[in-house]
Amino acid sequence: MKHSRLPLVLASFAALLGSTGALAQSAKPEPDFTLGYNVGVVTDYRYRGISQSRLDPALQGGIDFSHKSGFYVGAWGSTIKWIKDAGASKGSFELDLYAGYKGEIAKDLGFDVGYLRYEYPSNKLKDVTGANANTDELYGALTYGMFTAKYSHSVSNLFGVPDSKNSGYLDLSAAIDLGDGMTLTPHVGRQRIKNFSAGSYTDWSLTLAKDFGNGLTGTVAAVGTNADKTLYVTPGGKFTGRSALVLGLKYSF
């Protein structure tokens, strides 16, 4: 009689093994690659602290391909106004094309290196400044925990500034997880423009992002710069690097 429960125990053990095997089979392997899309709107398109949209709203969207090896490539676009504001007859759209590789050097220490092309289709800025707006940059970043340091180096003239090849931008930031889908990101950056020191400046921002789920993210950012108020202006004389709150909404799918 003392062995009467043995078949029941063996059956239960077999059922447990079966369920464990089923769970192992149901676990999906890491995909070789992911492909994502995003569309969004901002109340002002700020790049490195300077408005690209005359302090007005802008429509934006992009596509990203990432391979599990660490290689990625993508494209992103936005409506802009700064090229026409500079006096050019054409240039209302920005298309960014980029490719890079990211990985981990050690525990909690990651890296990201790549190339970024800022393309402004059919822009006529060269007729005004003597240099095309299209810009090529190489970049490298190190991330340790929540902190990131990134440097971008232009291998062409920078955004239509003549003789500005080898300009650089240093970006320091942190991503602070507040919980409940919220992230706080403080940032400070320094734009150095080769052979045009008057155009160099420092920018800063503090961005609060909220992940609402189902691909929807909202942001509110306080931004500002110490850029020259006589150089960075709209046709109406408004300073495009002024301190402001910028709201954004993005849907990723």
Image: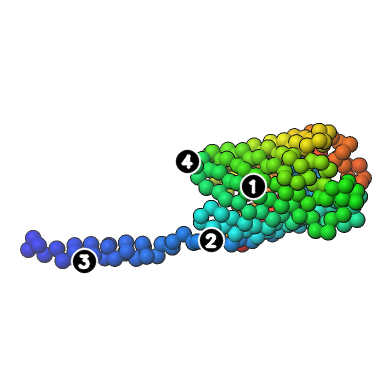
Which residue is drawn at the image coordinates 76% and 49% (left, top)?
Answer: 135
Residue type highlighted by circle 2: Phe
Q: Which residue is mark 3?
A: 11
- Nearest to viewer (mark 3 / mark 4): 4
In the shown orientation, is residue 38 left or right of residue 42? left
Q: Secondary structure at mark 1?
A: strand
Q: Which residue is mark 1?
A: 209
Q: Marks 4 and 2, Cα distance to the nearest angstrom?
A: 23 Å
Q: Earlier in the sequence, mark 2 or mark 1?
A: 2
Q: Earlier in the sequence, mark 3 or mark 1?
A: 3
Residue 112 percent coordinates (x, y): 58, 46
Q: Earlier in the sequence, mark 1 or mark 4?
A: 4
Q: In which image quadrant can residue 176 be found?
A: top right
- Nearest to viewer (mark 1 / mark 4): 4
Q: Earlier in the sequence, mark 3 or mark 2?
A: 3
Residue 53 visible here: no
Q: Are marks 3 and 1 in contact (CB under 8 Å)?
A: no
Q: Secondary structure at mark 4?
A: strand
In the shown orientation, is residue 228 left or right of residue 206? right
Residue 224 percent coordinates (x, y): 76, 37
Q: Which residue is mark 4?
A: 106
23 to 111, vertically: above or below: below
Q: Earlier in the sequence, mark 4 or mark 2?
A: 2
